[in-house]
Amino acid sequence: MTHINEKGEAVMVDVGEKNYTERSAHAYARIKMQPSTLEAILSDKLKKGDCLSCARIAGIMAAKKTSELIPLCHNIPIDSVTVEFDNNGKDELYINSYAKCTYKTGIEMEALTAVSVAALTVYDMCKSIDRGMVTEEIRLIEKSGGKSGDFRFDG
C-alpha cells in the first residue's frame, strides 16, 4: 500500500524521484432520469438556466481542485481538461471527461472528479423537476502514461 507507512499511518506518496511523463485519463459517468428531464436539459428549458454549460464548467473547475477534495492527492499541473455530454435520446445522460498533464503522477483522479461534479451539477440544476435522478456509474475508462502503464476498461 503506497499511502500507508510502516506504522500503518496514512501518508502522501513521495513522487520526488519519479520522471515527468505525459499522462492522460478518460472518465465516464451516466445519469438516469425521467425522459421529460432529459428533454428539458436538451431543449434548455430549465428554470436555473443552461444545465450542460454549467455542468461543464463545474467539472473543469472541480478537476482543478481535486487535490483539495481527495486526501493525499497531489496537486498536479493540468495541461487540459474537457467535459463532454451525450445521451441515449430517452432517459440517460452520459458525461465524459478527458484530462492531460505532463508530470510525475497520474491524472485519473482529476478526470473522475470532473465527471462526478458535473453529474452532481446536473442533479442540482434539475432536482426541482426530478429528484429521482440516479448517477448509476462513475468509472475510469482509460489512462495512459506513468510507471504502471496503460489501462483500458473492457466492459
Image: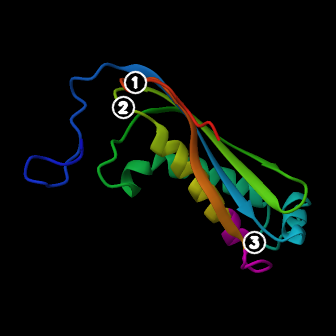
Choose mark 3 or mark 2, whichever is in front.
2
Q: CA distance from mark 1 to mark 2?
A: 7 Å
Q: Tell me which numbered mark, 3 or 2, is placed earlier along the sequence.
A: 2
Indicate whether 98 appears above or below 4: above
Mark 3: amino acid: Cys
- Label 2 belongs to which residue? 105
Sequence order check, earlier mark of 1 and 2? 2
**Residue 16: percent from left, percent from top:** 22, 28
Q: Are marks 1 and 2 in contact (CB under 8 Å)?
A: yes
Identify the secondary structure beneath mark 1.
Answer: loop
Which x, y percent locates residue 20?
35, 20
Which stretch is magenta? 122-132
From the viewer's side, name the closer residue of 134 and 49: 134
The residue where tag 3 is placed is 126
Give the amino acid at mark 1.
Gly
- Compared across the picture, whether 52 is left or right of 100 comes to right
Cα gap from disc 3 to disc 2, whole angstroms: 36 Å
Residue at 72% in and 77% down? 132
Residue 19 horizontal/vertical position (percent): 31, 19
